[in-house]
Structure formats: structure tokens, C-alpha cells
Image: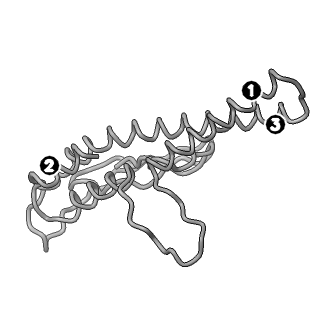
Amino acid sequence: QKGYRNPGTPRPKPNEPEPSGRDVLPGTYKIVYELGDNKDSTMVTVNADPRLGDRNNIRVSQNAMFDRLQKSSDKLTLGMDRLTEAEDLTKKMEAQLKDVEGKPADSLRKATMAMQDSIKNIRESISGKKFERQGYGQVPQVTVINQLQTARSYIGAKTLTPGPQEEFLVKRA
């Protein structure tokens, strides 16, 4: 299936391959290859793994829950992109104000610094605080990104239809 960009990852550059997606359900699919101006396509049949039995109903319900979770992830990705844009703008303003003197420039510098601090705090609440000091290792943090990752792993880890625990995690994320 089509892949999605995770929150906090850089925007893809032109002609960059898209991220990988989830496994597809058994069926027949049309694959389109594209290289420059050339295109070709072929039909591919995907068969279910015979060792696992008929799991289509389980996979359909897991995919539905993944899709619900993806809506939250897409909103978070958009928000993180806007934070990056705002951060870039504040850095440009800071560079333009570097050699400017006067009271208006000082007040603009203070406002820019306050915006940068706010952006940093918002990022830390979403992604977690980075520890630069040696010897701390990974300090467990409850963040928005962690909640998304936990929900994703719980939905996909079981060979069962998602239940109340996965539903709770999706709502919390």
C-alpha cells in the first residue's frame, strides 16, 4: 500500500522514492513503473500465506484501525511541518537583524527568540526532550510520537482483530 511520511521527518525532495507502506491484502494489483518520461505496467497477483490460514477479516479490521490512526499522524505531520517553516522564518529574521541597531530591532530580536523558545518547547512535547549529556542513556518520556508508535505496534503485532486495548491506544494517540 501507499506509504506515509512520519511526523518529524523531512519533506521528501523531488523524485525521491516514497516511504514504504503496509502489506497488501491478497488479490490482483496493477504495478506501474516510472523512470523519467518512460512508464510501464504489469498485473501482479498476491496470494495469502497458506501457513496462516484465512486472516483477511483480521487484516481488514487492522487496516481500518491503521487508517484511523493515520489521520491523526497526518495532522501531526502537517503541524510539525508548520513548526519547521516557522523555525526557518525566525532564523531568517535573526540573520537579517544581525547588523541592525536600535530599539525596534532589539524588540524584534526578543520576539524572535521568544518564538524560537516556544517552537522548541512544542517540539519537545511532541518528540521528547533530547539529552546531550553523556551517561544518561534513553530516559523514558511520554510524548505524542511515543503514543502513535505504541498504538501502531499494538495494532500490527497481534494476529487478532483489534480490541478495546488497541481502540484505547488509538483514541489516546
- Name the mark nearer the viewer: 1 or 2: 1
Mark 2: which amino acid? Ser
Q: CA distance from mark 3 to mark 2?
A: 51 Å
Give me the C-alpha separation between circle 1 and circle 3. Answer: 12 Å
First of labels 3, 2 by sequence position: 2
**x 59%, y 40%: residue:** 84
Residues packed near mark 3 inside 10 Å, few (<14), some (14 to 19) or many (20 plus):
few
Classify residue 111 by image quadrant.
top right
Helix, strand or loop at mark 2: helix
Q: Position of residue 11 (x, y in %)?
A: 57, 44
- Name the residue that disc number 1 marks: 108
Residue 131, placed above or below residue 94: below
The reply, left or right, for residue 26 in relation to residue 160 is right
Q: Position of residue 131 (x, y in %)?
A: 55, 65
Is the residue under label 3 in contact with that under label 1 (CB below 8 Å)? Answer: no
Query: Viewed as shown, does residue 47 lie left or right of 5?
Result: left
Q: How many marks?
A: 3
Which disc, if any, is residue 95?
A: 3
- Residue designated by label 2: 61
Q: Nearer the viewer, mark 3 or mark 2?
A: 3
Whether residue 173 is visible here, answered yes or no, is yes
Residue 158 occupies quadrant: bottom left
Q: Secondary structure at mark 1?
A: helix
Q: Dots 1 and 2: beta carbons under 8 Å?
A: no
